[in-house]
Image (cartoon, rainbow, N blue to C red):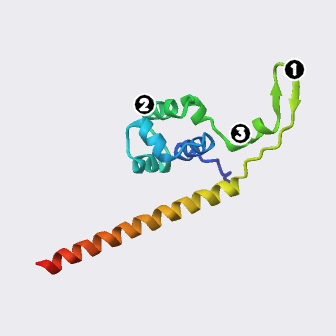
Amino acid sequence: METATKSNHIGRKISRIRELRGMKQEALAAELGISQQSVSHLEQSETIEDEKLEQVAKALGVTKEAIENFSEEAVFNYFSNFYDNSTGQVYNNHCIFNPLEELKKSYEESKKLYERLVEAEKEKVKYLEELLKKR
């Protein structure tokens, strides 16, 4: 009997860390000196070369190991039980971050971008049709 193992999809981890840091793909792209499309492709990659991973980690303000070892559970555990070293007290903070709201915002932003791209393509087609009529 086989047991399912959890995927170690580096691209998804980069995406989540970027989102948690409040960074858009465009901002990460600018930091890395690449296009937004390249960042999107990077975030879809299951594996990434060590040198590139180091660059991404630096741009995100984390270590390469932090990306490799990132897990959603660890993030939520960290924020759920925050330990204050100065007083020695454990605070059980409730996170005000709602993942569904963030997903909804991301979807709405993507939809607006898609609509703008479609409109731009329509304008290009109209322009090209006008050029053809003039011939």
In three-dimensional space, the C-alpha distance between marks 2 and 1, rounded to whole angstroms, equals 40 Å
Residue located beneath label 2 in the image: 51
Determine the residue positioned at 40% across, 64% down.
117
Give the residue type that dot 3 points to: Val
Residue 116, compared with residue 102, is above or below; it is below
Quadrant housing the C terminus: bottom left
Which numbered disc covers residue 75? 3
Left or right side of 63 for 38: left
Mark 1 packing: few (<14 Cα in 10 Å), some, or many (20+)? few
Pointer 1 or 3: first along the chain: 3
Determine the residue positioned at 49% across, 33% down.
59
Residue located beneath label 1 in the image: 87
Indicate the quadrant where residue 107 lies.
bottom right
Quadrant housing the N terminus: bottom right
Near-viewer residue (83 or 42): 83
Pointer 2 or 1: first along the chain: 2
Indicate the quadrant where residue 64 lies.
top right
| Badge 3 element | helix
Give the residue type that dot 2 points to: Glu
* Mark in the foreground, 2 or 3: 3
| Badge 2 element | helix
| Badge 1 element | loop
Q: Are marks 2 and 3 in contact (CB under 8 Å)?
A: no
Give the residue type that dot 1 points to: Thr
Residue found at the far left of this picture: 135
* Mark in the foreground, 1 or 3: 1
Mark 2 packing: few (<14 Cα in 10 Å), some, or many (20+)? few
Left or right side of 112 for 101: right
